[in-house]
Amino acid sequence: MEAKLRSRRDTLETFWDQGLQGRALLQAHTQFVDGNIISSFNGCPAAGEGMALIALGGYGRKELFPYSDIDLLLLYDKAREEHLDKVAEAVFYPLWDAGLEVGHSVRTVKQCLEAAEEDYFFQVALLDGRLLAGSERLFEDLDLEFRQNYIEGSRPIFLEGMLYHRNKRHANFGLHSYMLEPHIKESRGGLRDIQAMMWVTHVFFSLYELKGMEFAGLLNRSERLDFEKAWDHLIKIRNRLHYQSGRKNDQLYFEHQEEMSRAMGYRDEDSLLAVEHFMRDVHDSMQTVAVITDLFFEHVEEIVDRTTFRTDTRDEVLEKGVIARQGKVHLADSVVLEDKPYLLMRLFAEAARKNYSIHHRTRKIIKDNLHLVTDRLSKSRRLARDFFQVVSNPEACPILLQAMLETGLLSAYIPEFKHIESLSLHDVYHIYTVDQHLVQSVLELGRLQEGEEKVLVRIAKPEILYFAALLHDIGKGQGSGHSEKGAELAEKTGHRIGLAESDLADLTFLIRHHLFLAEVAMRRDLEDEKLIFSCARTIGTRERLDMLYLLTIADSRATGPNAWSQWKAALIQELYLRISHILEQGHSVEPVTDQASAEEWMRDQVTLLLGSSPGVDISAMPADYLLGFTLEEIKCHADLIRSMKDQEIIVESFRHHGHWSLLVITDDRAGLLARICGVLTLNNLAVLNARVCTWHNGTVVDVLQVKSTIDNTYEGQNWEKLEKELHLAVRNRLGLEYRLSQRFADRRTVNLPVQKRSRAQVKIDNQGSERFTIIEIYADNRFGLLYDITRTLSDFGLNISRAKIGTSGDQLVDVFYVQDENRDKLREKDLIAEIRNSLLHAATCR
């Protein structure tokens, strides 16, 4: 028997290859295990009358997945207690010896009832109880006692427990079925939601199948068929996920998704990867389950409220055909929609006005009547007014826009939205599908009422900003250039719903440039005055800048935790304020400051400040240093340089809000920045930004903004160790390559998720800056990558003046402002090609 059980995985793989992939595979697996367990029980002489072997939970439901626990209850009469050890040994030991996970208990009927009193999950497990072998009388006694004690007369209490655990589970595993790494079992829209619905159906309506629910009017035929399809699809996915993981794993991590898509026959097509098509279907299935189970539980709650806690149910007439009751908006009669199809949107507008939600039966009616949203109706100005009342209401919008998405009304009204429904782009930067990200962006925009209210109040038509948030990624899923494609789709949408030309121009501008501020802030030198003026020219007006600034924040926050940080917020705000200052001046957006005059003025100020004190050569300070630091900072640097004496390097750290600043002063030498970056990596510090200045006399003043990669605190960081290793590194006394390689090898031994690897990119730009060549490197982030890149730049003798280092999820984006050894831009085509190839190698070599 043990050998048979150990070979079950091979048997299941054979079943899969033969086409048993969904519920049929679960039943085949259950029958296989049943046969072995029943044989063990029946073959034990001690297992006589007065004992029953019962399957519980998923095994009881005949839903036994490859690595699921096998939950068993050995039920017995007190008179048979002396035989328990032999029966338990005969049944449980072979399962354990075969390496199976067995959830087992040995109890009397009385003990089972006591356990059910203490443990809600044991109550639920007993609902799925199935007699495998032994005494039918004993099994029926338990079933009868259990139902009398915990079902009859206790249904509201049972529902309360189910709702509590359901809400808690959603909070722990994902409130959205749109999560890009969904938990197939526990997330909203997962298999546990299906089980929860079936348990409540069993308890409240004595129904056991979906067809029975359809017959009872709990589901219509379309819902039942969609639900069955989604259920079977999730079963197939969980089956394969167990095989692929080689263990009980129910979360669809990125490292599993590509293999899953191949195993289930998906292919690259229509500008989407196979894995993106696969994940779209996953999200469609989970969304189907989420919506139907949500509506079901609302219905049952309403039944319980009516029968046990009846409250005031007087109707509030919002307009003819639309009423509100207990904070929910109802359509009084679905027939009225034929004559007044605009009520489909008016329902939401009334709900927004009163801050109500849409009743579950009304949501079903909306879903069944989407055919009434004709092209003519979509062009109605009245409908547009109602729509904008919903979208631009920060309090009511999150719930209502979600309902509009889930009923299909959003895509019916804006057909351009249809192709991004459940669209999942295969990266770890975003945590939501595209449609949910857009809804989340509107929500985040509403949250900016607190914190950015001074900016919001200046916007004349906030509804255009909210509409832009809803549409800003609508061009995704159609190949590269989603911002431009999105602007074209938004223009089409805006024309159809009757936007004024000026509003349409603002809308398309925001969508076309929704990445503009973030990209400039994270990748460009904000001290470059010409860059700021160029940004001002692109944006044009203060109001557009305000809207773009708020959209940038909302977009980043809605993307996920990796896309927003205090550091990024500070950079975007700095850029916003610099551009705002120029636009407020009212003159032509061209630089009015002569750099040479500014440099001369600054040098005079530094001379007055520092005097002729020895140890600091003001004439050696280059222009980019004088114009890049404040007088206060320059004085601090000068004081430290005077105090150096025989020291080779000075290291000072400063705490800021959300990050730390590291000041390094030393003499210039080959590969200095690479050595600094290497030591920082060894000390678990990530570089966010670097200002690298080399004076004409060889003095180096580097200021690096850093943060901990292990969530360390400023006090917890070992600054003494860092300073010691920097001293060793600049004196060529530290084997950085060896140490980093060792640390890299150590990290490879850890069982970390394996992410999809994208091609590294290197862009070398001679147009973006007057004095520097700008090098941008895009690559999958890894331990030691920054050191490898800076060492490669050092090999070519390049002078790095500025560096912007950032990560977007698992992607690293490095931007360096460089000059050659003659302090000039890179001009030679062959040299540029060689640098590009070397950087590509550095980005992918380990």
Image: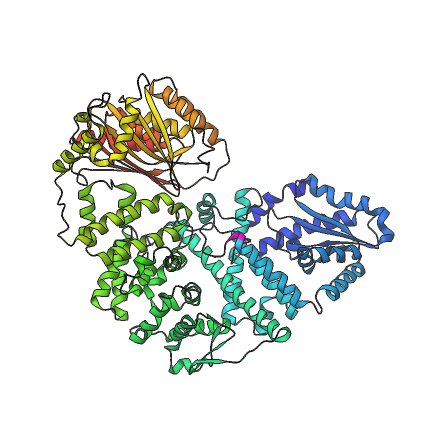
Q: Nearer the viewer, residue 394 or 275?
A: 394
Q: Is residue 688 left or right of residue 820?
A: right
Considering every residue shown, the one lying at the far right of the view is: 79
Q: Is residue 452 left or right of residue 709?
A: left
Residue shown at 18% from the left, 47% from the top? 534
Q: Which residues are magenta?
A: 172-188
Residue 522 x %, y %: 30, 43
Q: Nearer the viewer, residue 554 or 493?
A: 554
Residue shown at 48% from the left, 62% from the top? 288
Q: Quadrant of the N terminus?
A: top right
The image shows residue 264, relative to residue 674, as above or below, that is below
Q: Is residue 7 magenta?
A: no
Residue 558 x %, y %: 39, 53
The image shows residue 291, relative to residue 674, as above or below, that is below
Residue 547 x %, y %: 28, 57
User: What predominant SS class does the magenta segment belong to?
Assistant: loop
Q: Nearer the viewer, residue 627 or 548?
A: 627
Q: Is residue 292 left or right of residue 52?
A: left
